[in-house]
Amino acid sequence: MDEHPPSRKMTPEPPSVKISLMRTLVRLLVVVVVVIALHALITRTEAWISTSQYSWAMPGLTLAVLLIYALMIAIPFVPGVEIGLSVLALSGPSVAPMVWIATTLGLSLAYVAGCKVPYRWLHRVFLDLHLTGACRLLQRFEGLPPKGRVAFLQSQLPTRFGPYVLRFRYLGLAVLINIPGNSVIGGGGGITLLAGVSGLFRMPATVLTIALATAPVPMAIWLFGWEIPWR
């Protein structure tokens, strides 16, 4: 008979720095290769169509670009703003509403993925980055109901600002999505992915927040007919 009581689940030891670095580099390499390949394909196809008798195919290409853009912007650390501006430069202000819809769909897709992503996969990523503290936090977070998660996060935040951060979390999400250079902290896809992982954001309110947060620039370009300078 075992004399020791069952122990609390322990955080696994992170792999060696060499293995962690290799796994992280492979993940980043896959993302970079996909983004570069899609960008090259779109650019060459657009150039070929514009100089051939198949100019009638341009609307179809634009739709395909928007669908690819929606998928790309859902990937964490992908600079979605730059890609969106490239799409606007390609087709002009007339497609700005479609770019807005594609942006909303892409970021909403990242949010849904965050709601469904297995915590085991997140543990692996955090361990590869040697973020054992984040792993322990995730273990405590995983078994809590939504209200318990709010209370837990509030206990981890400064007493003075904690209640406001959680109360206005949708406003904070909108601000983070629009911060210039947010690809450094995961980009729009990474930010909305984590929003889904947290379990603190409800689907209808999150999609509405994403739609409102991403509307100003494309809608202004569409309403005022602004041209992208490098078009």
Image (cartoon, rainbow, N blue to C red):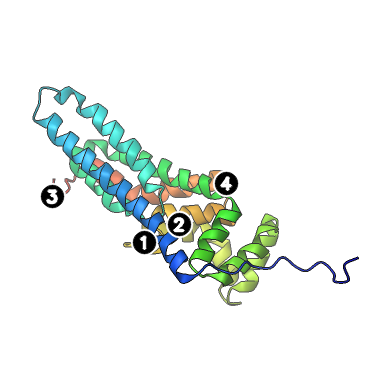
Q: What element carries label 4?
A: helix
Residue 123, visible in the rendered structure = yes
Residue on which the image places disc 4 = 116
Upstream in sequence: badge 2 or badge 4: 4
> In the displayed structure, does residue 215 sit left or right of residue 144?
left
Residue to which mark 1 is pinned = 182
Q: Distance between the residues labelled 2 and 4?
A: 15 Å
Name the image quarter holding the C terminus: top left
Q: In this view, does 148 lie above or below 73?
A: below
Q: How crowded is mark 4: few (under 14 residues within 10 Å), some or many (20 or more)?
A: few
Element type where label 3 sits in the image? loop
Provide the secondary structure element on which disc 1 rests.
helix
Q: What residue type is labelled 3?
A: Trp
Marked residue nearer the N-terminal end (3 or 4):
4
Q: Check disc 2: other Cα within 10 Å, few if <14, some if 14-19, many if 20+.
A: many
What residue is disc 2 on? Answer: 191
The answer for how far apart the CA atoms under marks 3 and 4 are is 39 Å
Judging depth in this view, the residue of 8 and 88 nearest the camera is 8
* Amino acid at pointer 2: Ile
